[in-house]
Image (cartoon, rainbow, N blue to C red):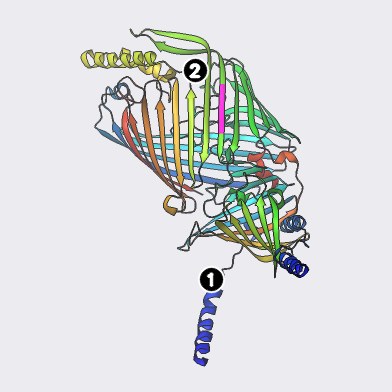
Amino acid sequence: MIKKILLICLLIVSMSSPVFAVDGKALLEQVDRNLSPESYESYRKLINIEPSGAKKEFTLFTVKKGVDKVASLFIAPASEKGRSTLRLGDNMWLNIPNVGKPIRITSLQSVVGGVFNNADIMQLDYAVEYDVEKIEEGAEYLLYLKAKTKSVAYDRLKIWVNKDKKLPTRIECLTEANMLIKTLYFKDTKDFGGGIVRPAVIETDSPLYKGYKSVIIMAGVKKRTFKDEVFTLTFLPNLESLR
Amino acid sequence: MKSLGCIFLILSLLMTPLSLLAEEEYTFDLSETEKKPYHFAGYIEAKPLLFGLDRDSALYKLRYFDNPQGQTQLEGNGRVQLEGSFEKNIFRVYAKTNTDLQSSYSGESERSTFYEIYASAKPTTSWKFDVGKKTMKWGKGYAWNPVAFIDRPKDPDDPEQAMEGYVLATADYIKSFDGPLTTFSFTPVLFPVYDHINDSFGNNYNLNLAGRFYFLLYDTDIDLLFMTGGSKPDRYGMDFSRNITTNFEVHGEIAYFRNSRKNVVDATGNRYTVEGESVSSVIGIRHLTSFDLTTIIEYYHNGLGFSGDEMKNYYGLINRGYDSYKSTGNTNTLIQAQQLAESGYVRANSMKNYLYARFSQKEPLDILYLTTSLTGMMNIDDQSWSLTPELLYTGFTNWEFRLRSGIIVGRRNSEFGEKQNDYRIELRIGYYF
């Protein structure tokens, strides 16, 4: 009798436990690599859409190297042209040509307004900033991520990953208390050439910005290597020379 | 049951086109990002201003002694900035012009100048050379930068305004590392001061040398700076900036000036020069809350500034000069006071110790692109102060609307109390193209 009860308990425990057949860390790293090469350049259009339908667009040229170096240059609209941002790990700066010297900014701020913040715009690899706590397997993989440090913009992420393509379809950004901050929807998977196949559109909405929506459209994603000196404050005003 | 199914089918059919319409198509054509060898851009601004004059203040008497004004004064300002560049291989030329237009009680005026015009060569990512007129903008402070040795003084009332540069030759050398020292860069500057070249900067006929060493060390920005050469007393400085947490930044600057000089007046109106070493410094923080309130607080010590007694003597000189003009028509004392004004007495923050606080709330009441701010500046030595509430709206692409007022408060013989205005209201409409 005791043996039977133990067996039933074992069965229940094994059924309710997360699936560990998939290596969460390896899957997350695979998702990162499928989203972008480790070093690349890209163009992005950011569109903030208000409940009235009014839109404001920003166009950025972005370069990334390794796990913790990202720099972006605004090339439109005219009011933002020439602004540039740099991220080195947890350090972030904004350079406004008129103001001249780069100022330190934080991941929660938004240089463009709307639902996207600086951490979204200067996104590092997910595997660099998060640990996989557990995975659930259904029609898609569902990864539960926990930030490695307090300096990361969102304490927790839930990522739904397409099983075949190993690409995210949806990401929920949450606080430590599991309060939803925003949801990112990955759409329109496209072949950018050079073996890069990834969603070209990321939509986001947030319960904190009811009725508002922001969209990122990717273009010209391609592998490119850069010298480390590109990712420095002194080089920041010269990002245009990389285009 | 069938009828329910029918209704569901009809509803589904009716809903289908709506859901298709809701699925908006986003397009991004790479041709929009095509880079041309040349670029042209500009900015136009209209800025009407209303001043409430303090007709008993010393600086009102100094400026309007022979042309008395009413309680208020209207002023119209306009600004046109044009910029362009041309790039070929490793070379680039860049120019930015600024035209200020003004219509005020004294008539209409126009001043046009090149803010920047320089040529650059960038042979590698580690090296860059610039020759021409350029702004350097050294320092980490928001309202004040005592280490900005080769920049024109910033307006602490409007620190984000574009500034005119100086003619110089400079280079940047950058080197990145793995380890606690992530970045090192060196920026040497050759800074000539001759007739018609930077001649407003200091003593003429000197080729000055300045430089900045930058380190990103243990996630802290650190600059070591210097300037020597004879146009101004030698000066050395250091600044830093670091994020203590992701939303809390601390910064500071310290500058040491050898043999600095200032012209002062004593209680009887005699003019003399004070010489000696001095140290100026800024320490500040920048903090962001989860609800997007940015706070900037800075303390500024101006080692070259005037003491309370030195300022009182100056205001006394103006008042005596004004009384003398009223009774005899003699303007000699007022002219002497005007000369002293130009040498430093009426510069922004000409005294010793100041506190600056700016609270800026982004998107209040969930109104996208609206920013409300409140800025306060206090002269700690005489407890006079100014308060500037501000509304900024950037919701229309390339347009900027800024409404702000300034309230100036202080007793007699205090810095803000003796300014020519009690308040001002300003509307600024800007368009970028």
Residue B358: x and y in percent read 45, 36
How many residues crowd mark 2 within 10 Å: few (<14), some (14–19), many (20+)? many
Query: Which amino acid, by three-letter code, is at mark 1?
Result: Ala
Span shown in magenta? B250-254
Mark 1: secondary structure: helix
> To which chain does the residue with label 1 belong?
B
Residue A228: x and y in percent read 74, 40
Q: Is residue B347 above or below residue A229?
A: above
The residue drawn where x is 51% and y is 46% is B290
Residue underneath mark 2: B303
Q: Quadrant of residue B23?
A: bottom right
Residue A179: x and y in percent read 55, 56
Residue underneath mark 1: B22
Q: Are marks 1 and 2 in contact (CB under 8 Å)?
A: no
Q: Quadrant of residue B67?
A: top left
Q: CA distance from mark 1 to mark 2?
A: 63 Å
